[in-house]
Amino acid sequence: MKWHREQYLDLLTFGEAPRPMFAELFGPLVGLDAEWRTQGATEAEIAMVAFDWDYVPVVACGGYTDGIGPPPVVLRDTTTERVERDFLGRTLKLLKQTATIPLPLNFPVKDMDDWRRVKPHFTFCPERIKWDEVEAARRAQAAGALVVAHMPGAFDTPRELMGEEIACLAYYEQPELMADILATLADTTRRVLEPISEKLTIDLLMVHEDLAGKSGPLIGPVQIREYFQPYYREIWDLVSSRGTRVFEQDTDGNINPILAALLDCGLNSIHPLEPAAGMDIVQIRRTYGKRLALRGGIDKHVLREDRAAIRRELEYKLDPALRAGGCVFGLDHRITNGTPIENYRYYVSLGREMLGLPPLDPSRTGWARMAM
């Protein structure tokens, strides 16, 4: 089902949503399409449209807040890998058979002098606002699309510049460096979104962090309060005063130890909530109630087990408190290789049945990636 932006916003803010939302946030991992073809999947199933997933059309607001520069230069491109150099000078390697995102092999920043060399890529310039795209977003919004603005991550950006180890140590060893990076991001983001939000209501503010692993977050509540909160609050207070209703973070891993601190920064929605990392959407709802909307949270790994395991997962996760609003039910990340198409079909059909949705009908198709 295609949702209107108002329906979606009402769902995430605990308003009068039409019904529970059942979505596919990310889609299949690389290689799963080949597995499913050998198991008899149709092309419509491989393209996900056969499952009639719920989605809301999304449009970018027309403002660019991340680092900007020339496109990457390809250094090597074979059937198995692509190596390129980006505008920051990083060498990136993509393993085509297993990944969709290239990973950096080196990082440009180790200290303040390095940061000053790349800082111009992150500072404000008027060209960051594409007014034709702002106008296109306004028209799309009038037709029901959700307008999304992105702000650079408070941890994600330093990690992309320095790598995780140096970024984590910099909070203690180079606090002036971390402060300057975040001050620059705040200034640029504010100067981009302030004029846009005068002309266009931004529906959802998104920040990507990926600041945790299975064993826990890479930073603690102290760093959240000292570094994240002033930055997050400056941007969220601005756009929320002009009508933005959702402030969402995309982060993998176990963030339970810092979740309360993140909510104090203004966040009111999080995805994808990985059960394998200890993120339990039922327990999170019991703890935080209507302070936090949730997207994802259904264990993708269970789909490689049997039907009984899938049923147990859905009976637990499709909790009445979550069905009442503030939740988009879906897998906690990409559909893993080794997931049989029969299990995936069963998951979809059982989930629809338990949520009171109509059975799949070949005349109803459509899918859109719901991870923003």
Image (tube, rainbow, N blue to C red):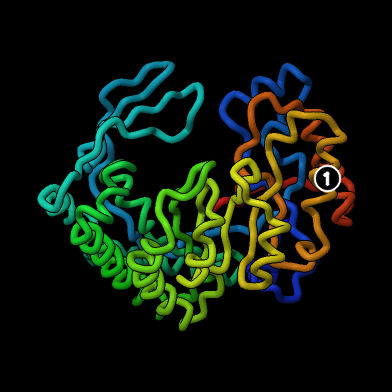
Looking at the rendering, which quadrant does residue 231 occupy?
A: bottom left
Give the image location of residue 54, x and y in percent: 72, 53
Residue depicted at x 61% and y 67%: 292
Where residue 172 appears, as percent x and y from the top left, is: 25, 55
- For the point 69% across and 64% down, the residue is 285
Image vertical order of residue 288 relative to residue 113, above or below:
below
Residue in front for this viewpoint, 288 or 137: 288
Q: Is 284 drawn above or below residue 16 in the view shown?
A: above
Look at 37% across and 33% down and name the residue there.
Answer: 103
Q: Is residue 354 left or right of residue 80?
A: right
| Residue 62 in view in this figure | no
Residue lying furthest bottom? 241
- Give amino acid for label 1: Ser
* Residue 281 as seen in the image, left or right of residue 200: right
Residue 339 falls in which quadrant of the image?
top right
Residue found 48% across the figure and 29% down from its top: 99
Question: What count of labels does the image hold?
Answer: 1
Q: Position of residue 242 (x, y in %)?
A: 47, 82
Foreground pick, 339 / 262? 262
Q: Nearer the viewer, residue 270 or 353?
A: 270
- Residue 56 image position (x, y, % from top left): 64, 59
Check disc 1 and report its element: helix, strand or loop: loop
Up the image or down, 361 lies above or below 256; here it is above
Q: Residues within 10 Å of mark 1 (few under 14, many from 20)?
A: few
- What is the quadrant of the N terminus in the image? bottom right
Q: On the image, numbered disc 1 is attached to which residue? A: 363
Q: Nearer the viewer, residue 125 or 238?
A: 238
Mark yes or no: residue 176 visible: yes
